[in-house]
Amino acid sequence: MSFSVTDPKSLNINFFEAIDKQWMLITAGNNEKFNTMTASWGGTGILWNKNVVFTFIRESRYTLGFVDDNDCFTLSFFGGNMKKELAFCGSHSGRDTDKIKETGLVPIFDENAPYFEQAELVLVCKKLYRQKLTEDSFIDKSLIDAQYSNNDWHYAFVGEIVKVLKKD
């Protein structure tokens, strides 16, 4: 099966379900070296008159360096069909594990960032904004104890959706 490029505004997907319940892979790098990680936090919308995604990556994650070092990243959605593989990608580090070999994911190398043949939907995103979440910025301080008791803070990324690939 192949992918077709489509307009982001034509998508009929419940991103609440897709991100929170089915999960997604955040991937960055190139055909020589890349990494992917599972994420269940993020969203889509309009910001700065652009179609955007926002996602969060902890500073301890190996993928953070790949996103930082590249202009683009992808969000790959699998429709809930690959929970075992996504669970593996979320619980093992690419520093010491070949996630691609272990999961059977098949990378496709776009000119901007890699994504996966098994995905049903891919958002190719150009980084627009990056900021580390800080304790001072939280209004609801209870979230700090619940999410950051170990001081492994997230970086927030806003990316412009530059291409949407939908499985044919």
Image (cartoon, grey):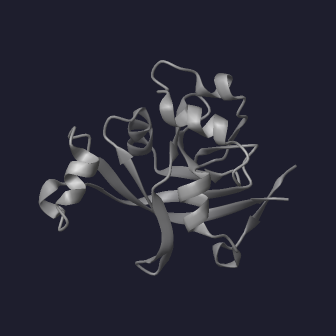
Q: Nearer the viewer, residue 4 or 138?
A: 138
Position of residue 156 measured from the top left corner of the image (x, y, whole percent): 34, 56
- Residue extending furthest toward the top: 96
Q: Is residue 15 above or below residue 147?
A: below
State the residue at coordinates (64%, 72%).
8
Residue 52 seen: no
State the residue at coordinates (57%, 53%).
75
Q: Quadrant of residue 10?
A: bottom right
Position of residue 163 measured from the top left corner of the image (x, y, whole percent): 64, 63
Q: Is residue 143 above or below residue 89?
A: below
Position of residue 50 measured from the top left corner of the image (x, y, whole percent): 49, 76
Q: Nearer the viewer, residue 83 or 64?
A: 83
State the residue at coordinates (20%, 58%).
142
With 60 as the anchor, is 100 left or right in this view? right
State the residue at coordinates (21%, 42%).
149
Position of residue 6 measured from the top left corner of the image (x, y, whole percent): 73, 69
Q: Nearer the viewer, residue 34 or 104?
A: 104
Q: Nearer the viewer, residue 148 or 10?
A: 148
